[in-house]
Amino acid sequence: MKAVRADGKRNNPVSFLRENGCEGPQRFRRRPLEPANVKVVAMKHYKVGYLIGSLAKGSINRKLAGALIKLAPENLDFTEIPFAELPLYSYDYDADYPPVARAFKDAIKAVDALLFVTPEYNRSIPGGLKNAIDWASRPYGTNSFTHKPSAVIGTSPGAIGTAVAQQSLRSVLSFCNAPQMSAPEAYIQFTPGLIDEQGKVTVESTETFLRNYMKEFHDHIERVLTVLPNDA
Ligand code: FNR
């Protein structure tokens, strides 16, 4: 329903304000974009720790990790979190964690997010990676993964590209309360030359897909940390 003035004139917000003692329209003009009016907001950087499931020197998953880092948004800063030196976990260690295990937990605590790049061994994740996750999840009450944004990806020469291992890892991370990026999923079949010596992905469609994967990972980190700020 239209508001009608008692004097019959048409409603005009500017003349109404003038008639009622307010300033003219210049008061409502946007201020020009002069340097003094422009606030430069620095892009927030996030620290991402990445774990490579393979211990092999020539690991194709290590190659994939290198390529992903190159394709990632520039405000993601990457550090590898190695785990090869960890002994096999037992809860006998809980009363007094060895320095190597403390350092591993501290490294996870120090990052904002985690990226798991893993091969598939016998339709699951390699034992070394599972052992490392067990170390970080304990002692009881000090789970290092709590609320840590995470993503999983992997490559194998086989056509399913680590799909089964990733499902297994997702189940573990779910129990460990690490909020995972659910999509996109990335099952990368490794073919000879897919990633060159410089870490460049040589197939354009795969490169585009992986670049988008890393952008989505960035957005996932931002979303999770907006709701669950990192108190590390
Ligand atoms: C494999 N490989 C393998 N590949 C796969 O797609 N599904 C599987 O279940 C397995 N299982 C498996 C078990 C073991 C013990 C080994 C050593 C290998 C093959 C595997 O994908 C291939 O070796 C990759 O090169 C492993 O990745 P990294 O270690 O090179 O990064």
Image (cartoon, rainbow, N blue to C red):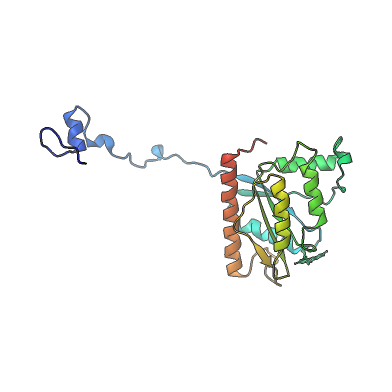
User: In the rendered view, would you say 182 is above or below 160?
Assistant: above
Across and down, in percent, residue 58 comes to 79, 64
Residue furthest out toward the front: 1
Image quadrant occupied by the N terminus: top left
Front position in the image: 50 or 40: 50
Residue at 59 percent of width and 56 percent of height: 183
Q: Is residue 142 left or right of residue 228?
A: right
Count of numbered circles in the view: 0
Vertical placement of 125 versus 205: above or below? above
In the image shown, does 175 or 143 lie closer to the viewer?
175
Residue lying at the far right in this picture: please name it: 92
Work out whether residue 75 can be spotted.
no
Q: Quadrant of the C terminus?
A: top right
Q: Is residue 101 left or right of residue 29?
A: right
Residue 222 locus on image (x, y percent):
57, 45
Q: 197 or 171: which is nearer to us?
A: 171
Camera sees residue 194? yes
Specify the farthest residue to the top. 21
Image coords of residue 166 (percent x, y): 71, 58
Residue 70, image quadrant: bottom right
Q: Answer with the quadrant where ligand 1 appears in the image.
A: bottom right
Q: Residue furthest bottom?
A: 192
Residue 130, compared with residue 148, is above or below; it is below
Q: Residue at x 71, y 43 (%)?
A: 145
**Taking 29 as reference, is 136 left or right?**
right
x and y percent of residue 90 in the render?
A: 87, 44
Image quadrant assignment for residue 6: top left
